[in-house]
Amino acid sequence: MQALSTQFAPLSAAHARSTPTDLIFQEKLTLTGDGAAVTDEDGTVLFRIKAKLMSVSARRELADASGAVIAGARMKKTPGLHAAVYIGPESNEKLMMVKAKGLRDITKCDVDIYLNDKVVGEACGNWRAKTFDVKINGQLAGQMTRKSTTAKGILFGADAYHVAVAPNVDLACMALLICALDEIYHDER
């Protein structure tokens, strides 16, 4: 995957790498909410995602490997025609928005990605097949696919995803974009 022509790091420039990176999401189901561990291809834990099960807005927090919270994601609280998720640090939780689009074709699961109220990208794909391409400023920033289905995934609905991320892309931001897609197009369990 080619590098983006300019760095895209709205949450954390420290988490943008100069080489392509493979992220592995492994959902965990707990009594207090679902979450995920996000590792690189070597198995090194980069992030932990904690979901608040009892939250009205389906809040998720992204923490680095040391446990420091980087940013969060939450569903838009007011109802609207298109489902939306806000992404941002605690100081600006509406820095980004991921919003569903194109409701006419029910076979597509596409979203616009906003930064400071301006569309900067999109994710297009098929949520049932768990495949998505994420583009920022028209350039491919990441590709998500579901890893092979595990017994845990079949029995408990815990998915595992592989996300190939282009160089110069904020890995923390990409992790929360995937969370946003999961919230907007979640499977009914």
Image (cartoon, rainbow, N blue to C red):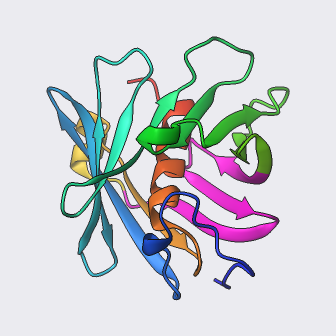
Q: Position of residue 174 (x, y in %)?
A: 52, 59
Q: Nearer the viewer, residue 175 or 25?
A: 175
Residue found at x 57% / y 33%: 85
Q: Position of residue 132 (x, y in %)?
A: 63, 55
Q: Count the labels in the image.
A: 0
Asked if one can make out residue 164 in the rendered structure from this viewpoint, the answer is yes
Magenta-span inclusion, residue 144: yes
Q: Main secondary structure of the magenta part?
A: strand
Q: Quadrant of the C terminus?
A: top left
Q: Position of residue 147 (x, y in %)?
A: 40, 61
Stretch in magenta: 120-148
Q: Position of residue 94 (x, y in %)?
A: 58, 36
In the picture as drawn, the residue positioned furthest to the front comes out as 91
Quadrant position of residue 38: bottom left
Residue found at x 64% / y 83%: 1
In the picture as drawn, the residue positioned furthest to the top comes out as 79
Would you say 32 lies left or right of 24 here? left
Asked if one can make out residue 186 in the rendered structure from this viewpoint, the answer is no
Q: Is residue 163 above or below residue 129?
A: below
Q: Nearer the viewer, residue 74 or 69?
A: 69
